[in-house]
Amino acid sequence: GIEEIDVEDLAFCAYLSRKNPLWYEGLLVCVCSDILDARSIALKFLRENVVLMEQVCYAHMPTYRRTLKLKDSDVLVTTPVIKAYGVFKELAKEIKRVFKGEKLE
């Protein structure tokens, strides 16, 4: 699925799932494939040129920051942010094109 969430929620989820959010032109994107194993994902890509993604979350973040720092109760979370590249850059472009900044219902 694909879902728009708050930057803080995306950063916290990325931290817990050990994923690095990717930023492209004002959009922060995080992709998870927690159930599928890396071998299955790689084979699908090599055989069919298809990238499997179980969950895609995105948030609007106009300015790039190298890290996101969150403090919730007594927990301090720091998540690195990577500038999007390759398929993730194309994914961010497609999200921007399709949803044009509107919240998903």
Image: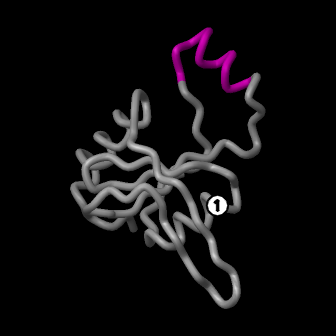
Foreground residue, 65 or 43? 65
Q: Is residue 13 positioned above or below 31 on the image?
A: below
Instruction: Identify which residue is drawn at 27% across, 61% down.
Output: 63
Which residues make up the magenta segment?
A: 40-50
Query: Residue at horizontal 76%, vertical 43%?
Result: 35
What residue is at 43 percent from the left and 29 percent from the top?
87
The image position of residue 11, as x and y in percent, is 54, 64
Q: Residue furthest top?
A: 47
**Prevalent SS, magenta region:** helix
In-front residue for pair 74/45: 74
Q: Which residue is mark 1?
A: 15
x and y percent of residue 42 in the render? 67, 20
Query: Residue 41: horizontal and vertical position, in percent?
Result: 67, 26
Is 59 or 67 nearer to us in this picture? Answer: 67
Q: Is residue 83 left or right of residue 2?
A: left
As for residue 82 lying within the magenta part, the answer is no
Quarter of the picture containing the C terminus is: bottom left
Relative horizontal placement of residue 90, taking residue 11 as reference (left or right): left
Asked whether 10 or 52 is in front, the reply is 10
Which residue is pictured at 43% across the width and 57% down the height? 58
Residue 101, percent across and down?
A: 24, 61
SS for tag 1?
helix
Label 1: how many residues lie within 10 Å, few (<14), some (14-19) or many (20+)?
some
